[in-house]
Image (cartoon, rainbow, N blue to C red):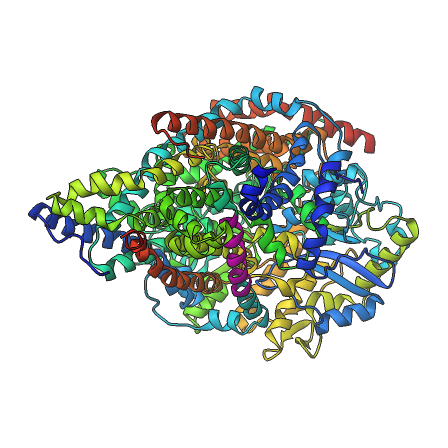
Amino acid sequence: MTDTRRPLRIAVVSATTAAMLALAGCSSGAPVADDGRLSMMVPYLSTTSPSGDNAIHTALEEIAGVELDITWVPNSSYADKTNITLAGDDVPQVMIVQGKDPGFVKNAEAGAFWNLTEHLADYPNLTTTMPEVQEAASINGEVYGVFRARDVMRAAVIIRKDWLEALGLPLPQTTDDLYEIAKAFSERDPDGNGVDDTYGLIIPKWPGGIGSNSPYDVIETWHGAGNRWTERGGELVPSFTTEQWLDGVDYAKRLVDEGLVNADYATLDSADWNQPFLNGDGGIIIDVHSRAGSIAALFKQADPEHFGRYVDVTGNLTGPGGELLAHPTAGYSGFLAIPKASVPTEEALHRVLEVLDALNSDEAWPIVSSGLEGVTYELDGDFAVPIEDAPQDLLDAVGSYAQLGTNVTGRPGFLPKPQSEAEQELYDKRRSIEASDLEAAVYDPAAGFVSATYAAQGAQLDTIIADARIQYIAGQIDRDGLLAAIERWRSSGGDRVIDEINALADDVD
Amino acid sequence: MAHVARWRWLYLLLLPGVVYFALFRYGPMYGAVIAFKDYLPFLGVTGSPWVGTAHFEAFFASPDFPRLLGNTLILALLSLLIAFPLTVLVALLLNELRLNLLKRTVQTLIYIPHFLSWTVVASLTYLLFALEIGPLFQALNGLLGTDIDFLSDPAWFRPIIVLQDIWKNTGWGTIIFLAALASVDQEQYEAAILDGAGRFQRVWHITLPSIMPTVVVMLVLQMGQVLNTGFEQIYLMTNALNRQVADVFDTYVYFMGITQGSYSYSTAVGLFKAVVGVVLIFGANWVARRFKQTGIF
Amino acid sequence: MAREPYRFNTPAGRVFDVLNIVLLSALGVVALLPFVFVTAGSFATEAELASRSFFLWPNTVSLEAYASILTSPTFLRALLTTIAVTAVGTVVQLLLTASMAYPLSKVGLPGRKTLVSLVVITMVFSGGMIPTFLVVKDLGLLDTYWALILPMAINPFSLIIIKNFFQQLPAELEESAKIDGANELQTLWNVILPLSKPVLATFALFYAVGIWNDFMSPLLYLNDNSMWTLQMFLRQVTAATDLSMLESDPSSLPPAQGVKFAVIVVATVPILLFYPFLQKHFAKGMLIGSVKG
């Protein structure tokens, strides 16, 4: 760690330290030692963080053979805490890094984290069975962390089942079907109340930029635009430079122009996404299939007897090209990185990796993914049934410890057992969609590449396109305006990004 | 030395404060040098390479600069010209309220919005202005005889921001003026009444002059914050259709610093804002001194 | 209030009074309604929250949201911690500020102008998050409650306002204290501070709210989550978005909407209750007049 002190500051600090220390009492901050402890920094997503010594923590420590010293950080403030932590001198030995954001890339390339490319194969539980995901999670082929595996195929179309039945329509197979259904939902009074008060697709304001798995991105993939990047004439190009991307945007524009989408698609608060669906205003949502489950749960609260009538789900749709092109997510959610500041030697690295290996062992995996059998859940076949009267704290903690799960070996976890036939049916459907769509997944061919220009100004560049897309759909700009925005992307640095990505791709080949 | 002896008690009182400012306010200021470096947390402040004024040059040359400056200044002016006088006005009205119970109740109620975060304020705004169904959407469009989508129409972005600002901060802002009003010498009113001064004359000749010093100080100090429009409120109300008028320095700093990881660049922008703030604050103080013999600080 | 200073009112004044009552009552209602909505939402079921947009009374009253947060020992501990830190911190910060403001209000004090300018500069310039963190760390304040109090001990803005207030106090008051043989320390404590109750009450409120609402300090300076304050929860529940596709993490189910509202209510009501206690001091401004007379 570099010393950032200045002489002036030392003087001031030492002059008053004595007084302040008396005021402060004792403070912690002992340097992390190799004394059977492993310090980690982990985000939590629930309302409260797990407290010190709970049963799950102890069980994992037993398996890992070390004391786990976890600093829990609220997910909403993780980036700030990460920057502060890297600047201080008591960096944890393992940090969960939430993604390949530019800050991480710069720090990693400057040598802040161990390059694990050559090391992971020495540990059976850290040797991935999904090398393509590890590749995607790497920085130009260099692996700076143990990735945390996630389901790849999650895109789905969620539809009002009762509306389809009322109009005698089947689930959509193609984007044309979807258009017809959206039109019918808007024009043929699917709720039978005699009033023209319904529409088709519900789209919220999307805070992410281009290629952030928005409904627009999914539709473009279906139309053959690829997934963020795609190959054209032996070159990698951003999907929005393709004809098919324009087709996808035009498709969305047509839906909007004909009033088949909620009129406030540019501003609808994403927290209220389910609301029009539940209220019977709109009838279609393009999002992850797990949303079908949460919507069904909300219907269940309102109408416990017949809630199964309202929600149906289907997978990716076949585009105008006649081929099913499914939109996958990245397949990982950040990774566990090991800072060199706190793990200075290869031996120390070895010890840390051994612990991570143990935390992904067959023994540890059920605990990480589902909690403690007999304490927080009971097994029923492949399903976990939560134990209702387990302490609430411990139940909340299960989700937090799941953040430690890497599962690079792709084991299935126990899933929560659906509570009724209708939920079981929906659940089975989601699983089968997932399996069949996976074969048609269109991966991002540039996922593993980080271009220098993109790291420096990518977010800004992407905003140009994401804004122009909405402005075009809204009619604020015409097609020439949209093409001009793409041209502006190119001239503001985008062309350099393309060159760099292709150079990186050539290096790999 | 006699000098120091004479003031010794006062210097003693001053000591803790001076230590505080030296340690916690001036101590960290060396951090501003990262505006002239390519800072990485991992390399630390001294370890990161120098780049000179490259970030400033890039910022001033950026096509974004004029737009950011314009958007920021317009919002700052609106706040200064509308929100600030409104705060003083509400404080004066509260002071004139003679039903004590109502006065206390209203005071307490109008502070409440200050405690709701911008996230909550923004989602309430989305609810109230929601297309077709929002109560304010219906009321305003009914009143104007229009069909405006307030949330995406660039022309309505600034009015909504100012409105939110007024709603959230006016009540809270009155506190400081009410404290000043509480200190007004009541005998002056008695004397004025005996002289036959009416309600409005009393406000004009006694109340207003007695809180003027506070008003001027607040105004001068606010000049230093002119370029600080805040980040969260604006970020939450921005969308693809109004971004042209919505982007301000603070959202830009966030975007470059957090999303894009260019700590140095965003520090450079922050430093630029601070320099402008210092110039404005001392300039305003100078002007205030010219008009009133006493200085503000 | 001993005397009614507005005895002589004109007809125009009466019309104004009525308008004023109506206007300010309306302001009060407008300020309150959204909070009523949040409170109503905290008592509503998830299904109702998902289907109704704006309401002031839930159709079905549900205590589930409160049950889930009030049974959590972490949450209760955080509530108590926050109250304690706020109470201690407000006193410490107010004392430090007042003790620095008083000398700076003495026009003749050598070095005064320079110091005031240096203070004003800190209103605009700051070293930023990371250097401040390093100072707090070097002082050994990490993982102590002082880290939530000392780094923000003197707000330059409050300092200037309090200083100006002291400056406006009639000089005779101090002279008479001096004649009685008091030094400046005693004068400040026995004469100035009691006279400054309205302004001190105001800044007590500002400081209390500052500590209460601060979420950056606990986030950055406290690693031990058993020491956390309420804002850490509030921030976490209100900042969460509901975009499953955007989050690459399917395990990130956002907290229930009702819980969000309940946390907002629980984190806001205690500090709101603080205000009426201070309010009575605002009415005591007449003190100055009575002392003079």
Query: Which quadrant of the rendered structure holds the N terminus of chain C?
Result: bottom left
State the extent of the magenta-drawn residues as a range.
C83-99
Q: Residue furthest left?
A: C11
At which x and y percent is residue C284? 32, 57
Is residue B236 rendered to the left or right of residue A148? left
At which x and y percent is residue A118? 89, 46
Q: Is residue C165 above or below residue C45?
A: above
At which x and y percent is residue A460? 58, 32
Q: Residue furthest right?
A: A347
Residue C214 in magenta?
no
Camera sees residue A369: yes
Residue C91 in magenta?
yes
At which x and y percent is residue B278? 51, 30
Is residue A382 rendered to the left or right of residue C53? right
Q: Is residue B239 above or below residue C64?
A: above
Is residue B11 rendered to the left or right of residue B240? right
Is residue C127 rendered to the left or right of residue C100? right
Camera sees residue A478: no
| Residue at the (57%, 19%) spot, across then down | B61
Q: Main secondary structure of the magenta part?
A: helix
Residue closest to the eye, B139 or C109: C109
Q: How many marks?
A: 0
Q: Is residue A253 above or below residue A360?
A: above
Q: Quadrant of residue B206?
A: top left
| Residue at the (33%, 58%) spot, across then down | B108
Residue closest to the eye, C115 or A336: C115
Q: Is residue A130 above or below residue C225?
A: above
